[in-house]
Image (cartoon, helix red, strand yellow):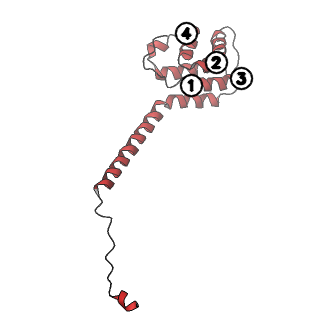
Amino acid sequence: MNQAFLDLQMPEPTSWWPLAWGWWVCIILSLVVIGLLVTHIVKYFKRTRARRAAIAELKSMSVQTSQLELLAVLKKAALSYTERQKIASTSGAQMAQFWLANINQKQSQYLADWLSELYKSAYAKPRTINEDDINKSISLLKAALPLKYKEVTHV
């Protein structure tokens, strides 16, 4: 019985190359998707570079830091995302309004009182910031930057 099977010759295994056209389509689509994903990630990191730098500067602040230094960091971050002439001359309530206009309603309610107090007392009496000020500033920057709209008309 085994003698009958010895005469059979098995064909050579089929090669993967050259690939069928369907495989080429899958490879090209995969490369396009990967390219678009990498481009999107690079653009995101470039767009959020100033925010990350401001957050790092806020995290490095001690609780004995002046309130004016905190406001300077917030203003520098805003200047990174808007035109200089729109932000450079604003202060106080206008700056608080700028930040509140660029965050969502829930966070706006959470940060509104703190922002108005922060900007009102900026030049009244020098005070040092506390841990809560730093944490709220970080959450403000994370919520508002990068700006959703290129043109800011309310400031």
Q: Earlier in the sequence, mark 4 or mark 1?
A: 4
Q: Residues within 10 Å of mark 3 (few under 14, many from 20)?
A: some
**Amino acid on which disc 4 is placed:** Gln
Q: Is residue 64 visible?
A: no
Q: Nearer the viewer, residue 30 or 51?
A: 30
Residue assigned mark 3: 130
Q: Nearer the viewer, mark 3 or mark 4?
A: 4
Q: Earlier in the sequence, mark 3 or mark 4?
A: 4
Residue assigned mark 4: 94
Q: Nearer the viewer, mark 1 or mark 3?
A: 1
Q: Is residue 108 visible?
A: yes
Report x, y in % for residue 100. 57, 16
For marks 4 and 1, give the CA distance: 18 Å
Mark on residue 143? 1
Secondary structure, mark 2, is helix
Report the side of 47 relative to 133 (left or right). Answer: left
Q: Earlier in the sequence, mark 2 or mark 4?
A: 4
Q: Nearer the viewer, mark 4 or mark 1?
A: 1
Report x, y in % for residue 1. 40, 91
Measured along the vertical axis of the image, is residue 18 above or below residue 124? Answer: below
For marks 2 and 3, give the CA distance: 15 Å
Report the side of 73 relative to 64 (left or right). Answer: left
**Amino acid on which disc 2 is placed:** Leu
**Amino acid on which disc 1 is placed:** Ala
